[in-house]
Image (tube, helix red, strand yellow):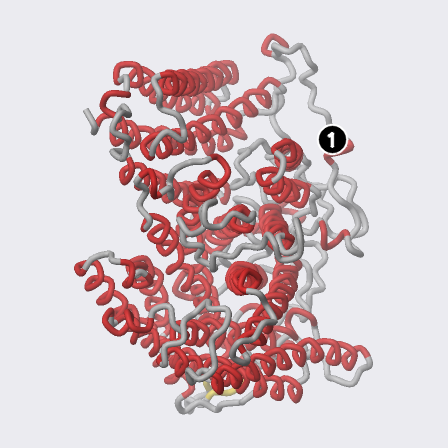
């Protein structure tokens, strides 16, 4: 359908320019061509490639954050150590926290969200493919911006040093005169834009792009948990944005938000930060909950126990996560009523989490369990998260918490939930979906070995911290003196940290070895469905073809793919109806309309870190960065919906589209057409 | 749709807005979702202002002395009228009445610009009366809150003017009325936020 042109209305042209629509767009407004090489990654809008890039970047940042942690542990390995000076130590543990939370855990969750949500709901791509690319590049730019604080202006001179929560007024110019907090505030502002844009995109995708018949209550639990995660991001990110804006304005423009001398409230930052920060905890954990909710049923050969309870307990966590933030502030003097209320709400939020743990156990109960590497990780998550959850409940008792606060007991608690609950879950997810994403198995033997090294190392690292904390060892201290009873457990903890590093290295080695083994033909082809799994992503070829599915899948039941493979015979026994190969699409359909790649998302994203440097060092840079962003957004809006000249790959598309000339918001949170 | 014949077997349901699950286009749903998020941005800023509005030095002028209610009421009225004009622009565009849609588009932008101009004027007056950005907590939080709103209005004007230019180039017709509708959603949201700000910031202290 061609657009309706107004060719015979010359009176309406004030500027006198031609009102003929140019059929050929300007040179700068063409679409990238060719689908091979580095360009296919740089300009891609494919949710799978973007998901893989999120995963690779998240893993890279996980390793960098891990190296910071190793230095922290080395410094604390024996009393009176001096590997890191107090100033450097502050920066290193701050960077460890910031990198792990914002640049490793959130993006790894985003990797699974991007890759799996469209596949699990049977969609061709996300709702706004270009916006998806934009959010990845913004995230990467913000992350690298934050990391450059390590060496800009001197080696470890300008890195953030206020802890990952950056309590103001401690992070004001007066107490943190280096540029570190500026890098923190602006860097997180940038990655926050990425999270917000990604959340909008994925929420619309889940709500609006499901396969016919895929009602909300037929969606896989993983998609549900990721959807709730995106909802939390959507509402939590603006709150941290406000906090970071206030801090940035204080530091750069002498505003007074945290200026106690002018009567500012020192608790304002804490409230704003933790209103974001506690939902953030669930933003981190819910993807992992979803991942193991896929792994456990598959390897127990049973449907998930109590699907509606799984979904609604996830929703309950999502809601209640907003009502517990002040339990981070029991020691700050918020008053007895607030303490009592938040204490109760914190105890209460353990209930939906307990429901989930019960359901995972009940799913395994009586199942025919196969202990593959992903299943090992999933069971480890259940066990380790339970330990972390229980120590969390001990904090909800305000009286106990006032003893535990700022000790290593807290550090032990949140590493049990973050590492034991989240990172182990992500590793399980890697092993589970690796054949689907890349078309080859990761070695089970090496995988199981690295699993045990990781779990043992993890418990050696963080288990002793419970004891250290209860003995009274403070967090965030650079060193301690001998004879306080801290020596032994600190040393054990350091050994454990290095075991985790070894396990991570084994994972990387596993990737390289498994890839080579597959190329040499030594390992079998995984086929579309190597694990006899249940959800739709297994119903297409491995690795997933660019267009996902050959045809629209009509969904009738929860676990649709499983029910197409298995049915009951007359005597009620479960029998195979069809093999996975018969049911799954082979990816041979080349006639699927795909979104074209685009230059503009990365072009616009590059501007944001430049603006960041400009705010810190020279405002003229802001102008350059702003031009990048504005130019990028206008280029984005005016580029042709499809590349008219694309040939040789299946992006080409000779249909006329209604929205030939998308005109749209500058606001970076909107995109016109998905095509 | 000419493409149905070609794409019989493709995942057409996920292609743009034909066959979306909820019957709303992705673009419009995306804007609604974004506006939900933006509520929290203003929520944070308004809370901060409420906390700090009375924290002024002993000799500083407070909100009640500073504000010129008649002036701001007029500029608020101008902004609210722009919500009406944007609706008129949308209905005109839906009827494919291009000329009227342009007039109302331009009117909306101009009304928005008058509002922003009024804000700039108001800021200069306050500054001359001694309320700078760094003077006290009231000044800091007032300028930040209203400044963020002003930036939102300005972004809206830029979007409307971009549409206006598109219209001049003959590329905005009834087929694209949804674009204007989406920007209209944003515009209404910014107006509603101003009603809240005007009530809380300007009227409460009186």
Q: Is residue A649 above or below residue A654?
A: below
Q: Which residue is mark 1?
A: A25
Asked if residue B155 lies left or right of residue A279, the reply is right
Asked if residue A389 lies left or right of residue B183, the reply is left
Camera sees residue A129: no
Q: Residue at x 64, y 11 (%)?
A: A15
Front-most of A155 and B97?
Answer: A155
The quadrant holding residue B168 is top right
Chain designation of label 1: A
Residue A606, horizontal then vertical, whole percent: 66, 43
Residue A666, horizontal then vertical, whole percent: 55, 33
Residue extending farthest to the left is A337
Front-most of A305 and B143?
Answer: B143
Q: Residue at x 50, y 29 (%)?
A: B155
Q: Where the N terminus of chain A falls, by quadrant?
A: top right
Q: Secondary structure at mark 1?
A: loop
Residue B199, horizontal then vertical, whole percent: 25, 29
Q: Residue at x 28, y 69 (%)?
A: A402
Q: Is residue A606 above or below residue B193?
A: below
């Amino acid at each position: 359908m061609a657009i309706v042109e107004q060719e015979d209305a010359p009176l309406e042209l004030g500027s006198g320019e031609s009102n003929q629509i140019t059929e050929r767009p300007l040179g700068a407004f063409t679409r990238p061509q060719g689908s091979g090489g580095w360009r296919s990654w740089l300009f891609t809008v494919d949710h799978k490639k973007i998901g893989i890039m999120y995963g690779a970047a998240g893993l890279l940042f996980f390793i960098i954050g891990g190296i910071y942690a190793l230095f922290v542990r080395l410094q604390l390995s024996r009393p009176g150590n001096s590997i890191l000076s107090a100033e450097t130590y502050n920066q290193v543990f701050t960077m460890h926290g910031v990198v792990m939370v914002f640049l490793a855990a959130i993006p790894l969750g985003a990797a699974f969200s991007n890759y799996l949500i469209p596949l699990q709901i049977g969609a061709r791509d996300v709702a706004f493919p270009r916006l998806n690319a934009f959010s990845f590049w913004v995230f990467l730019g913000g992350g690298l911006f934050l990391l450059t604080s390590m060496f800009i202006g001197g080696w470890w001179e300008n890195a953030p040093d206020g802890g990952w929560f950056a309590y103001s007024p401690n992070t004001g110019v007066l107490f943190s005169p280096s540029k570190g907090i500026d890098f923190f505030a602006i860097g997180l502002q940038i990655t926050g834009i990425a999270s917000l844009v990604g959340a909008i995109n994925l929420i619309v995708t889940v709500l609006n792009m499901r396969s016919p018949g895929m009602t909300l209550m037929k969606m896989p639990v993983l998609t549900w948990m990721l959807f709730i995660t995106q909802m939390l991001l959507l509402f939590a990110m603006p709150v941290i944005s406000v906090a970071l804006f206030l801090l940035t304005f204080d530091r750069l423009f002498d505003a007074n938000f945290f200026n106690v001398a002018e009567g500012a409230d020192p608790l304002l930052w804490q409230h704003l930060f933790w209103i974001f920060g506690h939902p953030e905890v669930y933003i981190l954990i819910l993807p992992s909950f979803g991942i193991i909710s896929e792994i456990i049923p598959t390897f127990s050969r049973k449907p998930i126990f109590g699907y509606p309870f799984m979904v609604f307990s996830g929703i309950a966590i999502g809601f209640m996560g907003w009502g517990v933030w002040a339990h981070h502030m029991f020691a700050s003097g918020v008053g007895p009523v607030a303490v009592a209320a938040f204490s109760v709400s914190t105890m209460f939020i353990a209930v939906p989490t307990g429901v989930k743990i019960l359901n995972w156990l009940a799913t395994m109960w009586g199942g025919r369990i196969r202990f593959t590497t992903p299943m090992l990780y999933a069971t480890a998550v259940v066990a380790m998260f339970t330990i972390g959850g229980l120590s969390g409940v001990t904090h909800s008792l305000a009286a106990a918490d006032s003893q535990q606060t700022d000790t290593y007991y807290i550090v032990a608690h949140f590493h049990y939930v973050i590492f034991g609950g989240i990172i182990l879950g992500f590793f399980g997810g890697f092993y589970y979906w690796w054949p689907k994403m890349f078309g080859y198995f990761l070695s089970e033997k090496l995988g199981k070995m690295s699993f045990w090294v990781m779990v043992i190392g993890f418990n050696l690292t963080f288990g002793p911290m419970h004891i250290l904390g209860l003995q009274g060892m403070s967090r965030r201290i650079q060193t301690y003196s001998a004879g306080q009873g801290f020596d032994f457990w600190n040393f054990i903890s350091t050994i454990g940290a290095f075991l985790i590093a070894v396990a991570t290295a084994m994972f990387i080695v596993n990737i390289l070895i498994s890839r080579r083994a597959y190329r040499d033909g030594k390992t079998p082809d995984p086929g579309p469905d190597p694990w006899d799994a249940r959800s739709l992503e297994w119903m297409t070829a491995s690795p997933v073809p660019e267009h996902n599915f050959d045809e629209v899948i009509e969904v009738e039941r929860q676990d649709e793919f499983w029910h197409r493979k298995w049915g009951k015979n007359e005597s009620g026994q479960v029998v195979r109806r069809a093999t996975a190969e018969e049911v799954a699409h082979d990816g041979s359909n080349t006639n699927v309309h795909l979104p074209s790649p685009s230059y503009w998302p990365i072009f616009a994203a590059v501007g944001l870190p430049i603006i960041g440097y400009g705010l810190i060092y020279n405002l003229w840079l802001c102008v350059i960065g702003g031009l990048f962003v504005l130019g990028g957004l206008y280029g984005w809006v005016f580029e042709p919906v499809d590349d008219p000249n694309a040939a040789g790959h299946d992006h080409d598309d000779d249909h006329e589209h209604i929205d030939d000339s998308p005109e749209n918001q500058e606001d970076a949170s909107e995109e016109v057409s998905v095509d | 749709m000419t493409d149905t014949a070609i794409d019989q077997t493709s995942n057409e349901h996920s292609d743009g807005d034909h066959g979306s699950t909820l019957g709303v286009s992705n673009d419009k749903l995306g804007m609604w979702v974004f506006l939900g998020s933006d509520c929290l941005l203003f929520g944070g800023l308004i809370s901060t202002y409420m906390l700090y509005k009375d924290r002024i030095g002993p000799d500083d002028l407070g909100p009640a002395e500073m504000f010129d209610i008649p002036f701001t009421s007029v500029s608020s009225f101008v902004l609210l009228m722009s919500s009406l004009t944007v609706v008129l622009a949308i209905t005109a565009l839906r009827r494919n009445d291009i000329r009227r849609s342009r007039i109302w588009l331009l009117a909306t932008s101009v009304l928005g610009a008058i509002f922003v101009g009024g804000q700039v004027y108001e800021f200069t007056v306050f500054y001359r009366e001694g309320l700078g950005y760094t003077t006290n907590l009231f000044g800091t939080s007032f300028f930040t809150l209203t400044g963020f709103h002003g930036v939102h209005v300005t972004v809206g004007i830029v979007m409307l003017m971009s549409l206006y230019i598109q219209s001049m180039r003959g590329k905005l017709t009834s087929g694209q009325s949804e674009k204007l509708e989406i920007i209209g959603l944003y515009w209404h949201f910014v107006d509603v936020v101003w009603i809240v700000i005007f009530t809380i910031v300007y009227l409460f202290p009186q």
